[in-house]
Amino acid sequence: MPESSFDAATWSPGPGGSGTWPEALAGTLDPSRRSFVESANAPDADFPIRNLPFGAFSTDTLEPRLGVAIGDRALDLRNVVEAGLLEGLDGRIRCALSAASLDDLLALGRPAWLAARVAISRLLDADHAALRDRADRETFLPAIEDIRLGLPARTRDYTDFYASEHHATNVGRMFRPDNPLMPNWKHLPVGYHGRASSLVPSGTPIRRPHGQTVGPDGPPPAYGPVRLLDYEIEVGFLIGPGNRLGDPIPASRALDHVFGLAIVNDWSARDVQKWEYQPLGPFNAKNFATSISPWVVTLEALAPFMVDGPPRAAGDPENLPYLRHDRDIAIDLELEVAIASKTMRDAGTPATRVSLGNYREMYWSIAQMVAHHTSTGCNLQPGDLMASGTVSGPEESNRGCLLERTWRGENPVELADGTSRRFLQDGDEVVMRGWCGRGERRIGFGACTGIVDPAT
Ligand code: CA
């Protein structure tokens, strides 16, 4: 039996699982499955019944609670539990689904996540009458455009990695043309401890920060609004049960601790970064804001899109044993960045796509990042967020930040309003989207957006 191969057909739910999970999971992924929420059945819907991502929301009249996106609606989980529509679930799971954020559900682990998924999938199925035929059904399904989506969990720790070889090589080449990758890069997934307090949900305006920078002639530095403001498109993963201090998570069990994925924008001040980053890495260049898309797409929903990671090039070092596992999973996840200036938004002009990449290109896998993070015994806790680092690919059009995309500003990108960008300007909106598959297999992540406000 494979140690922990996350595959809809062969995956084992581990201790406590009933042994029938793979079949139950396969049922929720059936492309022929339809919901009575008609908008979920559109071929280009981000949130068909096969997806069922979790988020946290509130309205003027509803206190914060969890929801599951279905088409253009959010299933109000507290309301559903209180109405007795999920009575088949264990009481602890129903209690966790009634909470204001995902923390309690995250702590319960994969068998509980899968049980909740199966029950919610059934509740939303076109052939299931319990919710479908209720006269008050609309009260359980507020429109997503009418709710305020918040952070999905109370994240206490946030870690950012640097797992794309294309990104690390491109950035390294700008500063060290003959030696772009540091000697450690292919031996361990490089990362740094980020700042959880400045995580913000998609749609939160991003004020241009001040910082200490030096001009092209070098020191002395000056303090003022940063000039080289950038985005980085990354994939974030939300941690489930986690580990006790002192007990590393082996790579083969790492995905048991990953609830799901979201899109992350690691806003970056490049002029601050350049001056401050040596010798301890990024600090103020990254700590003023990190945006996250509100809907967390579970590994269950992503199971059909798990693929083998890129082969290691000849001459690359072999991984140390603690970084090896039986199937090095990547995810076939398309990632798009688009920019809309204020002029474009005022004129109703769609955002201009500036890059399109794919998460399957990443050198280090999610399991390896979790295993390396905990290899010292460092403890992960429910709700912790990790991010992959900028997702870039081999082509110029795959580069996931402006630093790379414009090559430090040498090759500006053109927007639909006729202006060009080396770095972000005040009023620019950055719109990131992600999706897997096409046609009847497609699922989406929705958007991660933010508008740059002027410095004050
Ligand atoms: Ca980053």
Image (cartoon, grey):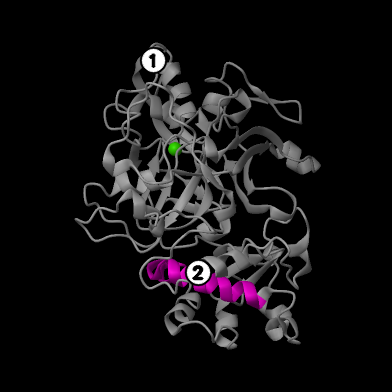
Q: Is residue 119 magenta?
A: yes
Q: Is residue 377 above or below residue 178?
A: below
Q: Is residue 287 magenta?
A: no
Q: Most prominent secondary structure in the magenta stretch? A: helix
SS state under label 2: helix
User: Residues in magenta?
Assistant: 101-123
Q: Is residue 288 left or right of residue 265?
A: left
The residue that disc 1 covers is: 176
Q: Is residue 29 above or below residue 443?
A: below
Dividing the image into 4 quarters, which one contains the N terminus?
A: bottom left
Q: Position of residue 315 (x, y in %)?
A: 37, 21
Q: Earlier in the sequence, mark 1 or mark 2?
A: 2
Q: Nearer the viewer, residue 173 or 244?
A: 244
Q: Position of residue 110 (x, y in %)?
A: 43, 66
Q: Position of residue 291 (x, y in %)?
A: 51, 48
Residue 197 visible in the current orientation: no
Total number of numbered discs in the rendering: 2
Q: Is residue 305 above or below residue 117?
A: above
Who's the residue at 35% across and 29% down the image? Answer: 186
Q: Is mark 1 within 8 Å of ligand 1?
A: no
The residue that disc 2 covers is: 21
Q: Position of residue 152 (x, y in %)?
A: 49, 62
Q: Nearer the viewer, residue 327 or 279?
A: 327
- State which image quarter holds ligand 1: top left
